Image (cartoon, rainbow, N blue to C red):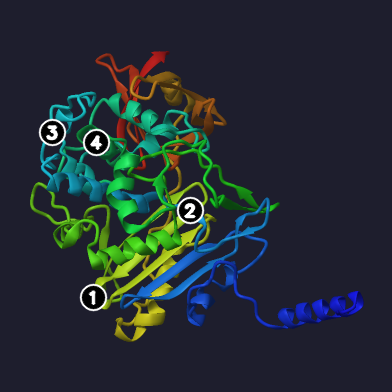
Amino acid sequence: MMSRSGASFLAAALLAACASEPQPRPGSEGPTHPEVDAVFADLDRDDAPGAAVGVLLNGALVHRAGYGIANMDYGIPITPETVFDIASISKQFGAMAALLLEEEGRLDLDADVRSYVPEIPDFGRVITPRHLIHHTSGIRDWPQSMILGGVMYTDVISFDQILRMLYRQEDLDFDPGSEYSYSNTGYNLLARIIEVQSGRSFRAVTEERIFDPLGMDDTHFSDDHLEIVPDRAESYAPDDQQGYRRAINQLTALASSSLNTTLDDFLLWMENYDSGEVGGVAVLERMMERGRLNDGEEISYAYGLSTDSYRGLATVGHGGGWAGFRTNFVRFPDHDLSVVVFCNVSNCDPAGRARRVAEVFLDDRMTSPEDGDGDETDAPRPPATLPLAALRAYEGSYRSPELDSTYDVLIEDGALVVRNWRIEDVTLTPTGEDEFAGDQWWLSQVRFRRDEEGRVDGLLVTGGRIRNVRFERVQF
């Protein structure tokens, strides 16, 4: 029998031997490629958030790894099994669910959406599910409407809240089918239509028809922000003082976002684009079809997918961002390459990193990177000013029935300021007669209206992906 001291010596020797050998990164049981590792070397730390990265080439998994920390409170590392909110990459699953229902004759993509969801206001123009899928509906994008209405992105924002906001919309931003303007709200409405036509929750439909058949066991659309999700990553944003701060995510925006999944599960979905196990070849070919405007112009957005090219090679993919999550996937269908990057930190640049990974495998087939010509830019114009007497005509309180929100317009330090107690002030700079530019992206243009007597009686706000939201003057 070995003595206690001998056993202790042997254990110490074994530990020392193990420590001298390179230890595998947690969760990186799959293959890794050193040049891909190099793209993410700055994230390969135990004191910062990072990314999960996967690469498929010619049907084979060639890279599968996690970098950085999933939860900085507890030092939990990112692995291929870590659950991420993949944000707008989620849209392709809403489009797929719609196509599956259409194939069964349960959904008409060219029907009036009000025949499915009568709560939608009658705008005097027909909106179809096809418009929703291709972002040509004219429906306002809720992230801009929410913040303009005083809702912060750190607040609880639910699927039902988004729909209630849509039901209050007073007008469309443009005639359906006449323009392309990215609208998350359109996909949320698509999810509601799928629920109505299937008689099931959107979460259940996608699990039963897409995720379960593919073995995507750790994937679901979040319909409850309080639900406990094992192995879920937190999201973060850089902070000058602490290094990083948590970026709160309390969103449940079905179909447009809010898909919880892992790298391993998502790679199964990437393989489905080749196998056709879910949907079949015909439906998957439909997924790649670009939308068309009323005048016949083809747009690059297909069925929850962006079709494009990179350095001369055709691509299909999508990006996403919410809270501190930043995600991207890109497929090079003619070269059987798929790259997936899920990050839990807002400055990760997953799209740029995904392209760099693609170059590792396809650089010899790509065209040379284009050199910038140093584009000339116009010299900034000095800000216009108005005398105080002219500015006073705009002072007052203005209320939007659509947003159920009131703003005060007042003068501070010789400039007009728009104020709502829930959000930061917006300073207005004159750009034309009764027209001003705001210094926040969600309130970038303000146009005041006048009555027949020349008095200012309201204003219209444009910003981001919303246009001409009406505010009526309630106090002079």
Tag 2, which secondary structure? strand
**Mark 4, residue position:** 173
Q: Hey, what amino acid is under mark 4?
A: Asp
Q: Distance between the residues labelled 2 and 1?
A: 28 Å
Look at 38% across and 81% down and name the residue there. 361
Question: Residue 84: which disc?
Answer: 2
Question: Dot 4 surroundings within 10 Å: few (below 14), some, or many (20 or more)?
Answer: some
Pair 4/2: label in front: 2
Query: Would residue 462 be seen by someone viewing this image from the given angle?
Result: yes
Q: Which residue is at the front of the view, 334 or 123?
A: 334
Q: How many labels does the image show?
A: 4
**Mark 3, residue position:** 112
Q: From this view, report whether residue 51 is shown above or below residue 446.
A: below
Q: Hey, what amino acid is under mark 3?
A: Asp
**Mark 1, residue position:** 334
Q: Distance between the residues labelled 1 and 3?
A: 37 Å
Question: Dot 3 surroundings within 10 Å: few (below 14), some, or many (20 or more)?
Answer: some
Q: In this view, does 122 lie to the left or right of 66?
A: left
Look at 59% across and 67% down and name the residue there. 26
Pair 3/2: label in front: 2
Q: Hey, what amino acid is under mark 2?
A: Phe
Q: Hey, what amino acid is under mark 1?
A: Asp
Query: Would residue 372 be seen by someone viewing this image from the given angle?
Result: no
Q: From this view, report whether residue 211 is shown above or below residue 152.
A: below
Comes first in the chain, label 3 or label 2: 2
Q: Quadrant of the C terminus?
A: top left
Tag 3, which secondary structure? loop
Q: In this view, does 236 lie to the left or right of 110?
A: right
Question: Dot 2 surroundings within 10 Å: few (below 14), some, or many (20 or more)?
Answer: many
Coordinates of residue 405 in the picture (x, y in percent): 42, 22
